[in-house]
């Protein structure tokens, strides 16, 4: 993100702010990247000085190298140089060909908006709980507006991914699954919570890699939207409809 600021690359900033939040960075830290008076640890301050120097004249100064050496070994410093170089090169391409951030992504220096908001529905599309469940149920089997099968699109900078989410709230929480037919994967929903028409759950992946996935969203009739936090990768929006 510091490289994005120094190269004025909106696309890099727009997508990596989401990744940073997903990896555990705070909003204050992200805002601090463009604030010259922000306070950083010695290790972080040295890193940002290195980025700034590489972006300005392609060379880390002796003083900054010494500051980096205080908390890193030579291999780590070399890795920093290559990572900065990679994102400078990428920024040069993105800026030159005019690649713009996807709609709804933050502008350079801004924070992403992560609120899950569904589009408005027409009155004709509104359905009662009885319509959704197909009839009356007992108190122990009472369903909510979340129950059912949902076809959603997970929006990622690399490519959109079609997912099928099945949710069942009859036991007070959420059970079900998240399936990707194109990837050949299906994971169970755990730790599901329901608050009115809002929901959250985890869907831990074990194959082909171990990864924690957290989903938060809102249902409005037959529409669903929200965002997915992928461990160490970022926060990405999704939207879809009931099948």
Image (tube, grey):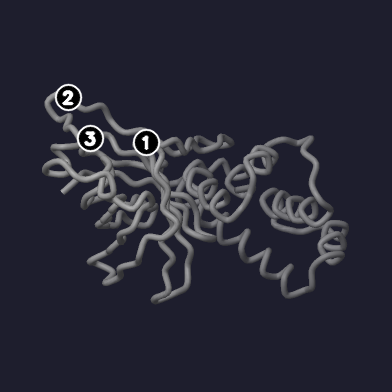
**Residue shown at the point (31%, 50%) measured from the top left:** 169
Locate residue 7, reporting x and y percent: 59, 45
Q: Secondary structure beneath disc 2?
A: loop
Disc 2: which residue: 122
Q: Nearer the viewer, residue 159 or 132?
A: 132
Q: CA distance from mark 1 to mark 3?
A: 12 Å
241 above or below 35? Answer: below
Q: Nearer the viewer, residue 157 or 225?
A: 225
**Residue shown at the point (71%, 35%) measured from the top left:** 35
Disc 3: which residue: 221
95 above or below 88? Answer: above
Disc 1: which residue: 196
Locate residue 179, reporting x and y percent: 28, 63
3 or 2: mark nearer the eye: 3
- Left or right relative to 85: residue 153: left
Q: Callout 2: few (<14), some (14-19), or many (20+) C-alpha neighbours within 10 Å?
A: few
Q: Secondary structure beneath disc 3?
A: loop
Q: CA distance from mark 3 to mark 2?
A: 10 Å
């Amino acid at each position: 993100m510091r490289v994005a600021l120094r190269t004025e690359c909106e696309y890099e900033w727009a997508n990596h702010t989401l990744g940073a939040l997903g990896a555990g960075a705070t909003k204050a830290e992200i805002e601090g990247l463009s604030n010259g008076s922000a306070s950083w640890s010695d290790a972080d301050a040295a890193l940002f000085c290195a980025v700034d120097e590489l972006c300005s004249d392609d060379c880390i100064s002796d003083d900054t190298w010494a500051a980096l050496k205080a908390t890193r070994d030579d291999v780590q410093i070399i890795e920093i140089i290559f990572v900065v170089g990679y994102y400078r090169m990428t920024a040069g391409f993105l800026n030159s060909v005019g690649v713009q951030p996807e709609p709804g992504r933050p502008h350079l220096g801004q924070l992403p908006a992560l609120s899950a908001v569904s589009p408005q529905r027409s009155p004709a599309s509104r359905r009662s709980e009885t319509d959704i469940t197909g009839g009356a149920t007992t108190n122990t089997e009472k369903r909510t507006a979340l129950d059912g099968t949902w076809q959603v699109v997970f929006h990622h900078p690399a490519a959109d991914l079609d997912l099928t989410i099945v949710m069942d709230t009859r036991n007070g929480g959420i059970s079900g699954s998240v399936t990707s037919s194109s990837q050949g994967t299906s994971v169970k929903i755990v730790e599901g919570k329901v608050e009115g028409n809002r929901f959250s759950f985890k869907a831990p992946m074990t194959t082909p890699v171990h990864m924690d996935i957290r989903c938060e969203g809102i249902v409005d009739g037959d529409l669903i939207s929200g965002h997915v936090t992928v461990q160490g990768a970022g926060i990405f929006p999704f939207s879809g409809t009931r099948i």
